[in-house]
Image (cartoon, rainbow, N blue to C red):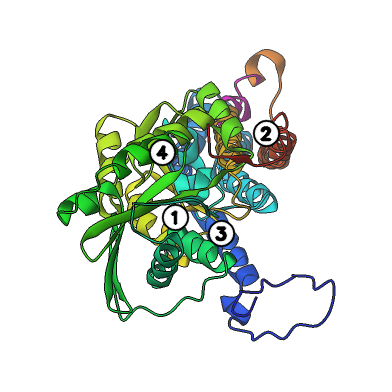
C-alpha cells in the first residue's frame, strides 16, 4: 500500500513498484545491524573485567616467580648462572596470561555472531552475560504475545441509536489515534462500506481512550474508567461487555453527546509460539508475567490462553516502568519485552530490555536486545545462548587460571631435582601458546549451541490461534 516501508532485500514478485530511499548508507537496517554486532563484540563482559584484573596480578606473579626462581636456583640450588637464568626465563614466559586475556572476548565474539545469525541482536557483552541471570520476564500483551493486528468483531448499540451512524462516527473519530485498537475500528468501518470524515477536534487520553468532535457531535470512546471519569452512566452496556472480555476480546464503550451510545469489541490473535514460550520459560525456572493496559477480564482470558498465571492489567503507559521497579524490589532480575513507544521507559528500567523487531524505533533504541523476527521463542533462544556463552566463559577462565598456576612451578624446575626434567624457554613459549589455542578452540565450540537454538519450540503448533476462550 502507498506509504508502507520497504525493507532492503524485499522481492517484488509481480508488476512494478516505485519507492523512495529514506535511509541510505549508515542509516540502513543492515548497517545498523553490523554496527550493533561490532559494538557488542568490542564491549567487555563483567567476567572480562574480572579476567583483566586477574591478568594484572598474574603478570606480577610471573615476573616475581622469575626472580624468585633465579635467586633460589643460583644461590640455594648450586646451579650455574645460565641454568638459573634459563629456569627464570621459562617461568616468566609460561606464566604470560595471554589465555586469560582471551578467555571471554573470544566467547563474546562468537556468541554475538551466533545471535545475529538467528535474528537476535545483542547490543553489548554485559547483556549477553546478564540474560543468563534473568528470573522473571514481563511480556507486553499487544504485539508481543499477540499478533498486534486486532480486528473489529462486535458492534452493539443502545436502543434509539442507529448502528450504521454509530460506527461511521466512531470510525471517523478513531482516525486520529495511532493505537492498534483504533486502527482495527477504522479498518472495520471502512470494510463495512462507510465513508469516514475527519474529526474537527481530537484528544488522545493515554491509557483510557479518546475524545473527538465529528460533524458537531462530541464522541468519547474508551474503557469503563473513562466513562466513569466523565460521569457517563453506561447502564446495561457493562453487563454486555463482560462476556466479550471473558472471551479475550477488548470491549470499548462509546458515548455520543454525553450519553452512552454503545460498545465495540476488538480481538487480536495470539502468536502461534506464545504458549510454547511461556511453557519453556517456566521449565527454566523463569516466571512469565503479562502486562497490559486492557481491562482485567480481557487480560486474564488471554493470559489463561497462553498459560500465564501472573497478570498486571489496566496498567497505564506511564506506570509500566513502576511495575518493573516493583518486581525488582521483590528481588527479581527482570527482562521486559515490548514493542511500543509506551514500553520504552519500562525497557530502560528493566535489567534487560528486549524489543520485538517489528516495534517502534524508540523501543528498539532503548532495548539492549532486539528480536528481528518478532517471535516470542527468540526470547528463549537469547537466554539459551546466554547460558551457553557464560558456561564457555567460565570454562575458559578456569582453564587459563589452572594452567598458569600449574605450569609456573614446572617451568621453574620443580621436576628437575627428581627426574631431571626442565623446560627450555622455547618450549615454555610453545606451551603458553597451546593454552591460548585451547581457549580459542573452546570458544569456537560454542557454535554447537546452534543446534539447541534450532530445536527451541519445535513441538509448538504452526498456525495462529484466536485470543478467545
Q: Earlier in the sequence, mark 3 or mark 2?
A: 3
Q: Which mark is residue 245?
A: 4
Q: Position of residue 423 (x, y in %)?
A: 69, 31
Q: Earlier in the sequence, mark 2 or mark 4?
A: 4
Task: Give neighbour class at mark 1: few <14, some 14-19, many 20+ (Cα, 10 Å).
Answer: many
The segment highlighted magenta reads: 404-415
Q: Taking 218 as reference, is 371 left or right?
A: right
- Element type at mark 3: loop
Q: Position of residue 239 (x, y in %)?
A: 32, 37
- In the rendered image, the quadrant that contains the N terminus is bottom right
Q: Look at mark 3 in the image and give the residue it sits on.
A: 358
Q: CA distance from mark 2 to mark 4?
A: 32 Å
Q: Which mark is residue 456?
A: 2
- The structure residue drawn at horizontal position 56% and vertical position 25%, both measured from the top left corner, is 78
Q: CA distance from mark 1 to mark 2?
A: 23 Å
- The structure residue drawn at horizontal position 46% and vertical position 64%, both measured from the top left corner, is 164
Residue 407 belongs to magenta span: yes
Q: CA distance from mark 1 to mark 3?
A: 13 Å
Q: Earlier in the sequence, mark 1 or mark 3?
A: 3
Q: Look at mark 1 in the image and give the residue it sits on.
A: 367
Amino acid at each position: 500500500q502507498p506509504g508502507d516501508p520497504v525493507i532492503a532485500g524485499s522481492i517484488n514478485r509481480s508488476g512494478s513498484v516505485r519507492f523512495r530511499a529514506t535511509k541510505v548508507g549508515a542509516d540502513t537496517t543492515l548497517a545498523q545491524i553490523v554496527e550493533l554486532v561490532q559494538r557488542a563484540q568490542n564491549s567487555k563482559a563483567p567476567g572480562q573485567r574480572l579476567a583483566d584484573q586477574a591478568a594484572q596480578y598474574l603478570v606480577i606473579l610471573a615476573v616475581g616467580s622469575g626472580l624468585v626462581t633465579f635467586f633460589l636456583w643460583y644461590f640455594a640450588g648450586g646451579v650455574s648462572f645460565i641454568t638459573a637464568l634459563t629456569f627464570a626465563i621459562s617461568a616468566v614466559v609460561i606464566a604470560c596470561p595471554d589465555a586469560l586475556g582471551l578467555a571471554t572476548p573470544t566467547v563474546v565474539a562468537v556468541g554475538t555472531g551466533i545471535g545475529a545469525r538467528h535474528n537476535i541482536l545483542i547490543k553489548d557483552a554485559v547483556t549477553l552475560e546478564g540474560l543468563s541471570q534473568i528470573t522473571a520476564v514481563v511480556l507486553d500483551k499487544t504485539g508481543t504475545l499477540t499478533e498486534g493486528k486486532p480486528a473489529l468483531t462486535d458492534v452493539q448499540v443502545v436502543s434509539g441509536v442507529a448502528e450504521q451512524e454509530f460506527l461511521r462516527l466512531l470510525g471517523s473519530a478513531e482516525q486520529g489515534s495511532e493505537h492498534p485498537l483504533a486502527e482495527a475500528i477504522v479498518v472495520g468501518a471502512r470494510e463495512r462500506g462507510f465513508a469516514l470524515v475527519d474529526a474537527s477536534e481530537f484528544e488522545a487520553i493515554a491509557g483510557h481512550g479518546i475524545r473527538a468532535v465529528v460533524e458537531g457531535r462530541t464522541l468519547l470512546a474508551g474503557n469503563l474508567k473513562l466513562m466513569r471519569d466523565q460521569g457517563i452512566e453506561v447502564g446495561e452496556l457493562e453487563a454486555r461487555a463482560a462476556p466479550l472480555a471473558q472471551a479475550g476480546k477488548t470491549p470499548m464503550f462509546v458515548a455520543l453527546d454525553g450519553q452512552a451510545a454503545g460498545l465495540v469489541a476488538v480481538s487480536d490473535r495470539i502468536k502461534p509460539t506464545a504458549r510454547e514460550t511461556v511453557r519453556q520459560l517456566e521449565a527454566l525456572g523463569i516466571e512469565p508475567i503479562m502486562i497490559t493496559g486492557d481491562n482485567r477480564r480481557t487480560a486474564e482470558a488471554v493470559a489463561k490462553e497462553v498459560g500465564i498465571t501472573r497478570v498486571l492489567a489496566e496498567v497505564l503507559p506511564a506506570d509500566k516502568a513502576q511495575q518493573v521497579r516493583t518486581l525488582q524490589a521483590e528481588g527479581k532480575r527482570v527482562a521486559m519485552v515490548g514493542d511500543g513507544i509506551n514500553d520504552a521507559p519500562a525497557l530502560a528500567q528493566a535489567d534487560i530490555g528486549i524489543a520485538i523487531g517489528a516495534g517502534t524505533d524508540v523501543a528498539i533504541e532503548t532495548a539492549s536486545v532486539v528480536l528481528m523476527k518478532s517471535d516470542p521463542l527468540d526470547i528463549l533462544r537469547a537466554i539459551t545462548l546466554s547460558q551457553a556463552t557464560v558456561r564457555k566463559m567460565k570454562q575458559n577462565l578456569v582453564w587459563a587460571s589452572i594452567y598458569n598456576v600449574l605450569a609456573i612451578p614446572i617451568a621453574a624446575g620443580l621436576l628437575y631435582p627428581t627426574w631431571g626434567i626442565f623446560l627450555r624457554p622455547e618450549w615454555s613459549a610453545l606451551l603458553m601458546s597451546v593454552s591460548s589455542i585451547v581457549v580459542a578452540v573452546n570458544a569456537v565450540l560454542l557454535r554447537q549451541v546452534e543446534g539447541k537454538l534450532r530445536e527451541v519450540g519445535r513441538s509448538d503448533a504452526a498456525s495462529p490461534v484466536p485470543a478467545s476462550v
